[in-house]
Amino acid sequence: MAPAPRRLTGETATVRVWDGPIRIFHWSLAVLLPLAWWTAQQGQMGWHRLIGYAIAGLLAFRLWWGVAGGSTARFAGFVKGPRTVARYAASLFRGSEPGPPGHNPMGGWSVLALLTLLIAEVGLGLFSVDVDGEASGPLADRVSFDAGRFAAHWHHLLFNGLLALIGLHLCAIAFYAAVKRDNLIGPMLTGVGARGEGFRPAARWRLWAGLALAGGVALALAKGLKF
Ligand code: HEM
Ligand code: HEM
């Protein structure tokens, strides 16, 4: 494995916080999600489904990267138990020392919540049927019309849940910037931050395996799992 990058810019040391795949995953999601909403509003269901498959591929990649990716991407590294979360929450308004690079113990759970909701949203979309039964997900023919309508109903409701969680996500980032003077956006854009140490990158083959998995999942869903 290559050593974690560490370089000096002027007086400040910059260290690797996020690897490229996580950043591409994140910003692709931030672009594709509003597009999914917009295409649904416009009744552009062909585009809506295509965007949905792309999001499904991204999510498959993220699950893989959560066990095989760089150290800050791994679930085992950032999903903490209730005691650690409570201790972290209690220290939120104190001027505590910044922790290691990556998600903090509260952020870790919000990442899991976001990923779970996104997976459920895509899953429901796959089975959704619209009122006249014309714009349907590729797996809608596997279930009854009523079940397809039920999926569409929850697809609609869950989208509002997602919006609420994304709103919370943006508020948390604004809180860190304004109150804790911690810029989280910079590292998600550039990959590097000014604090923390010990990032371990993933081997290159894991990236290729993740890309193959993502492409395979997106294609298989687009074909309605009919081969
Ligand atoms: C559709 C909108 C968005 C969604 C669904 C979303 C989702 C996510 C997810 C799932 C993560 C965890 C990354 C990972 O480990 O996989 C994350 C992290 C992050 N997001 Fe977003 N995001 C959205 C929009 C934004 C926007 C607009 C910004 C910037 C203003 C932003 C800034 C960040 C930052 C800074 C992190 C890293 C937080 C940390 O340091 O722990 N996100 N986001
Ligand atoms: C995270 C990804 C997705 C998001 C954010 C999303 C969002 C939405 C939204 C906001 C609507 C309009 C709901 C309403 O107001 O009634 C909608 C409708 C729909 N979506 Fe998605 N969607 C996603 C993925 C998918 C996928 C993967 C499929 C299938 C391939 C799909 C199939 C449908 C269908 C068939 C409808 C029409 C349901 C109806 O008219 O009642 N969606 N989606």
Image: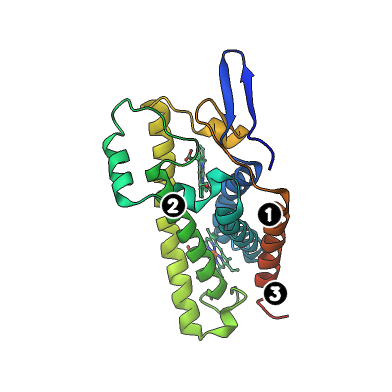
Viewer-closest of 129 and 141: 141
Q: Which residue is mark 2?
A: 163
For mark 3, give the secondary structure: loop
For mark 1, give the secondary structure: helix
Q: Residue at x 51, y 86 (%)?
A: 144
Q: Which residue is mark 3?
A: 223
Residue 222 quadrant: bottom right
- Furthest toward the bottom, the residue is 144
Q: Residue at x 55, y 47 (%)?
A: 73
Name the mark on residue 46: none
Q: Residue at x 58, y 50 (%)?
A: 29
Q: Residues within 10 Å of mark 3 (few under 14, many from 20)?
A: few
**The N terminus: image quadrant:** top right
For mark 2, give the secondary structure: helix
- Disc nearest the viewer among 2 and 1: 1
Q: Position of residue 17 (x, y in %)?
A: 56, 36
Q: Amino acid at mark 1?
A: Arg
Q: Position of residue 98 (x, y in %)?
A: 41, 29
Q: Position of residue 131 (x, y in %)?
A: 51, 76
Measured along the vertical axis of the image, is residue 51 above or below residue 10? below
Q: Residues within 10 Å of mark 1 (few under 14, many from 20)?
A: some
N-terminal of the two: label 2 or label 1?
A: 2
Viewer-closest of 40 and 25: 25
Q: Residues within 10 Å of mark 2 (few under 14, many from 20)?
A: few
Q: Position of residue 179 (x, y in %)?
A: 36, 27
Distance between the alpha carbons at the discs numbered 2 and 1 = 32 Å
Name the mark on residue 206: 1
